[in-house]
Image: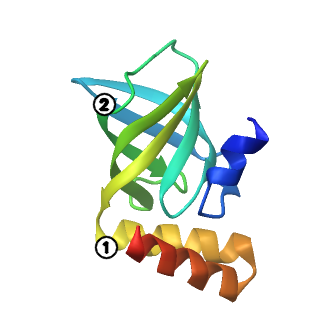
Amino acid sequence: MSDTYDERRRFHRIATDKPITVTADGGSHDGVVQDVSLRGVLLAVDDGWQPATGMPVQARIRLDDGDDCCIEMHSSVAHVRGNRIGLQCTSIDVDSAARLKRMVELNLADQELLERDLAEMLTA
């Protein structure tokens, strides 16, 4: 990605390789999360799916092998670049938000950065 694109980001992104399933238009697409933030997800899919920008989707990130621990969010497609798809979170349930916050918190290792991201999320 270009430096200009990276400069527009307001939330710290955490690199990961968690599996994700995106549901849209009655179909589902499996992929791998490239990075995640409090506001969105960048994922890679291998099935050739090319959604339209702005398309509403449901995303489910699996945090472990079980179905109990996951992050679910309603999102919209922010951008598509090849097989990489950026999703912007539009709503998230309380449990998923807590899991996402904890994931970011553990990977940032800086409470001040986390608090800054949380404050930015509330004003965005």
Name the spot of residue 77 as percent of width and height, x first.
40, 35
Query: Can you name the residue that lies furthest to the front here?
Result: 4
Tag 2 secondary structure: loop
Q: In x, y percent, where is residue 45?
A: 55, 25
Residue at 38% x, 44% y is 59
> Relative to residue 93, is residue 63 depicted above or below?
above
Q: Residue at x 57, y 59 (%)?
A: 37
Q: Is residue 13 left or right of residue 119?
A: right
Image point (31%, 31%), residue name? 55
Residue at 62% in and 55% down:
9
Q: Which part of the image, by quadrant, shows the C terminus?
A: bottom left
Residue bearing mark 1? 94
Residue type marked 2: Met
Q: CA distance from mark 1 to mark 2?
A: 23 Å
In this image, 104 relative to 91: left or right? right
> Furthest-left residue in view?
26
Which element type, helix, strand or loop, lies under badge 1? helix
- Closer-to-camera residue (22/52): 52
Query: To which quarter of the image does residue 28 belong?
Result: top left
Q: Which mark is residue 55?
A: 2
Tell me the quarter of the picture where residue 115 sits: bottom right
Residue 88 image point, x, y percent: 43, 48
Can you tell which quarter of the image residue 71 is in?
bottom left
